[in-house]
Amino acid sequence: MRLNSASAFLLGYGFLMILYWVGIQLSNITDLPVNLFYSFTTAVLAFLGGIFGLFISKHWGGGKSAVGKAVLLMSLGTTSWSLGNFVWSFYTFFLQTEMPYPSLADVGYTLAVPLWAIGVYFLSQATGAKFSLRRMRGRLMLIALPLIAAVVSYYFLFVIARGSSIEVEGGLLKIFLDFYYPIGDWVILTMSFLLFGLSLKYLGGRFRTPVFVTLLGFVIMFLADFSFSYTTTVGTYYNGNTADLLFALAMTVISIGITSIDARA
C-alpha cells in the first residue's frame, strides 16, 4: 500500500502520539495538564483524518458512487468522534471535570458508530464483496457474533466490574453507553467479517490493503471502547491511560485506511 501525503502525515502523527503516551507513563502522574491534553491531541488527529477523508471522497464523486459514499460516511464518523473528543477535552481541561462520562461528548461518540457501520456497508459494495447475509450462515453470524459480544460485555462490565449492581455513578445511562460502544464496534466488525471475510476473492486490486487497514482500526476501536468502559467502572481510568492510547491508535489506523482509498493513487 502506497501512502499518499495525508496518510503519511497521519502515520507520523500517530507515531508521535505513541511517544507522547510513553512520556505520560514515565511521569507516573495521572493528573498533570499534559495528561489532559492527550485527549485533545487525539481529537485533532481524528478531525484531520476525517477532513482528509472528506476531500478524498470528492475524488470519488462524493455521494454519487459507492466508493464515495463509503469514504464520505466513514470520514463523517471519524469527524463526529473527534468532535466528541473535543468536548471531552473542554470538560477536562477547562472545566476541570475529572471524568465527564456520560456527558455531551457522547453525542459525537454515539453518532460515529452508525456512520461507520453504514460506511462499511457501502465499502463492501464499492469493492464488489458479496453481501453474505443472503446466505443462512451469514444471517446466523450477524445474530450470533453481536450476541456473544453482548454476553462478554455483560459479564465483564456488569457482573465483574459492578458486582451486578446498577448503583454506580452515571446510573442507567452509563450502563447503556458501556454496552453501546463495544457492542456497536462489534456489529461493525461482524459486518466486516460477513462482507469481506467470506468474500476475499472479490477484494482484488490496489485497495485491498487500505480496506483491511481500515477494518483493523475498528478492531482496535473495539478494544479501546471496552477498555474505557471497564476502567471507568472499576475506577482505574485516568486521562492518558492505556484506553486513551488505544483510541489514538484506532483513530490513526482508521484514518490511514480511509485516506489511502484514494482515486489518485
Image (spheres, helix red, strand yellow):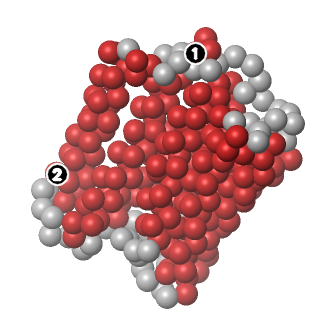
Q: CA distance from mark 2 to mark 1?
A: 38 Å
Dot 2 or dot 1, earlier in sequence: 2
Q: Amino acid at mark 2?
A: Val
Q: Amino acid at mark 1?
A: Leu
Residue picked out by circle 1: 200
Q: Quadrant of residue 20?
A: bottom right
Q: Residue 258 appears at what percent x and percent y?
A: 68, 42
Residue at screen point 70% across, 40% down: 64
User: Mark 1: few, some, or many residues within 10 Å (few <14, many ≥20)?
Assistant: some
Q: Residue 167 appears at what percent x and percent y?
A: 15, 69
Residue lying at the far bottom of the rendered structure = 95
Q: Residue 200 appears at what percent x and percent y?
A: 58, 15
135 or 22, nearer to the observer? 135
In the shown orientation, is residue 44 left or right of residue 137?
Answer: right
Q: Quadrant of residue 80?
A: bottom right
Which quadrant of the figure contains the N terminus? top right
Q: Is residue 92 above or below residue 71?
A: below
| Residue 171 appearing in the image | yes
Q: Residue 239 appears at what percent x and percent y?
A: 49, 69
Residue picked out by circle 2: 159
